Image: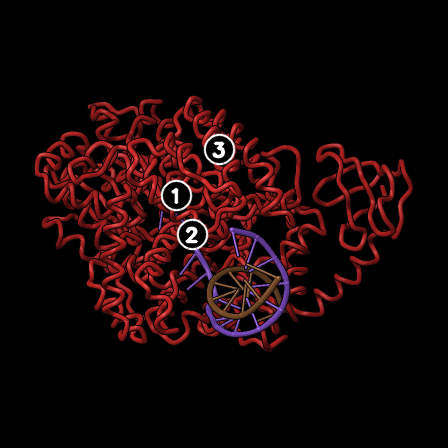
Chain colours: A red, B purple, C brown
Amino acid sequence: MGYRLDYAKDLNPAQLEAVRTLWGPVLVIAGAGSGKTRTLVYRVVRLVEEGVPPERILLLTFTRKAAREMLRRAALLLDEQCERVSGGTFHSLAHLMLRQYGHLIGYLRQFTILDRGDAEDAINLLRTALGLSERRRRFPKKETIASIFSKAINKRLSLEEVVAEEYPHFLDDLEDLARLFEHYIRYKQEHQLMDYDDLLVNWYRVLKAFPEVRREMGRRFEFIMVDEYQDTNALQAEIVRLMAEEHGNVMVVGDDSQSIYAFRGANFKNILEFPKLFPGTKIIKLEENYRSRQPILDLANAVIEHAKEKYTKCLFTRKEGGKRPLLYKARDEADQSRFIADRILELREEGVPLQEIAVLFRSAYHSFDLELELAKRNIPFVKHGGLKLIETAHIKDIVAHLRLLLNPYDMLAWNRVLLLIEGIGPKTSKRIMEFLRSEADPLEAIARFPARPSYAKGLQTLAKLLAKLRAEKIPEGQLSLLYDYYEPIFTRVYYDDYPKRAKDLQQLLAIANKYSRLEDFLADLALEPPEASVAEVETLEPEDEKLILSTVHSAKGLEWHTVFVISLAEGRFPSSYAVGREEDIEEERRLFYVAVTRAQENLFLTYPATFYVPGEGRVFSKPSRFLEEVRQKFEEWRAEESSFMLEEDLEETPSSFRPGELVWHPVFGEGKVKRMADIDKVVVQFISAGEKILHLKFARLERL
DNA sequence: TGTAGAATCGTTTTT
DNA sequence: CGATTCTACA
């Protein structure tokens, strides 16, 4: 049979075998940078070339972005029919299927998805209703309770097992927790609500209880591929097993050394159990690295060498040469930020585009200081990870109104909406909700509630809004109606910072206009939450080159020319939260491994010798244990070198400019001075980057 | 109901 | 230390 692609030429022997093995269960152990994505993409193409209809192929990935990207690449290699391959996350697949089959277990088509915050709100509500908040002080808080429930579900353990294992100090409260758990489960069912875990649980329930659905799945998805399998949990493994029961054509791909989601129930041992779940599994290992230079791999291999349990491979590359990773010991965080900014500007001058450089850190807040420094120097960046748009209070307010249109019995949304009206507090809100509960059409009934004069007007306005929203079918139109209504509330409730928040509302509108159906819009918002707009140094063109700041978790699967891993101090990376439990430290180590294997050419490691700890002020830090473990694998940056350069930098920028002068900036290039904006700020019109305000203290601006 | 002041926390990572 | 949550009172 003739193929349009020359597979043997494009792939190495192990990759080729993975691509050619179409039938039966396959486990691919793929080291970092070993062409895992390439292998998956080629396998999709191969299946399509073999005549498999694209929609019969199911590609499960960790984010939907990853799925889209892979299918785009497949389409480039072959043709656009590859875009028709079914792809997404476990959660999005479950959601899709439950819309279709949810009625089998008593759910309406338009159930509401609760995000983590909503779930916590519900738990809080029930905890108060059960009188568990007053009794003793020690009862766990809602975040903790939500975690306990979630762990139990995802690891398929009993509440008692989870509490005993991870929260032994709450063992006394086990009975109350169990009672609360039952109520929570019932509450969600009664109100047509599902949290993230329910999507998986309920889909599993359907698959388990209805053999005809399993058979239908087998026909619908003849070939299943799962990426990042090391980050799936026991429940997801079961779902895969049932989905593939009919034909057993399932390939999972992953790397046990890169498992970094144990906190949400993933278990890296899952990947090694796969052959037990599917007897006759063929195992293929990809060990050749195509990403990093040898010195970087040496360090990476040394990191994982220290792991307590390691089952696989040692990476090697044919990309010889390259620089050894560099460690910079900074005096403090400000020094660390300055060092990074200096190096970035240097690299930029050497011709490395900003989007080829990434700064990685353990927790979102570790980059705060750096963000300020970058803003001062006008280095554009985007940040991934951290706060999501949907998690901000004002966006939740808006979304709550929309949720009512799809699920009028969503009492969590009602509560939020009602509390925004002046004169309505928790008591009144509860009374109104009890009234609504027994109404056939709550959206219409709200106008008939016997309201007290103090809030009657507000309630009528809400009733009118809901009627108008219902008549409007397009999400974008609904949003603009909603913004008119919300505006006065918005300025009243968030008066201190509403201009900043208003930007988020605009962003939401921009997202909404891509949707024609409200249910799709809301589902995507919950399942694929857009990140909050932190992008600071604003540039006009969106595709402007920008430096990447990212949590290590959000950097998974990506790679850059140069990578900085910052704040490598005990308590930061590894997180203080993980110190004390060996398995948590092991996960931090894998996280560090993921971080360093993102680098192709250059790897910089930094840590501040002192940093601020709330309550204690400035404290001396200890270098991360992970640095100690791989001491021979990096070189230290010499301090004199950097302080010398600093002085030089300061001399470089003159202290004042005149309008009309031609100047040059390492990032923005050539420009003309318009005027001084302040004693130390100058406004420059750049030829390619537009107008910028630069701080003379930090910008390295030269006269031409 | 809404607010001001007091108490109390607790610092991750994400679908 | 800062933000969030609770308590007391108008």
| Closer to us: A206 or A634 | A206
State the image coordinates of residue A476 (x, y, percent, origin top left). Answer: 49, 26
State the image coordinates of residue A514 (x, y, percent, origin top left). Answer: 46, 27
Which type of secondary structure does the marked residue at label 1 adopt?
Answer: helix
Which type of secondary structure does the marked residue at label 2 adopt?
Answer: helix
Residue A432's disc number: 1
Residue occupied by mark 2: A427
Counting labels gives 3
Find residue A353 and report its image quarter: top right
Judging from the image, mark 2 belongs to the subunit labelled A
Q: Amino acid at mark 1?
A: Ile
Q: Is residue A164 above or below residue A25?
A: below
Residue A305 appearing in the image: no
Position of the N terminus of chain A, as image quadrant, is: top left
Q: Amino acid at mark 3?
A: Gln
Which residue is pictured at 31% across the width and 22% down the height?
A: A81
Please report whichever mark, 2 or 1, sits nearer to the chain's N-terminal start: 2
Residue occupied by mark 3: A460
Is A588 left, or right, of C2 in this rendering?
Answer: left
| Closer to us: A642 or A93 | A93
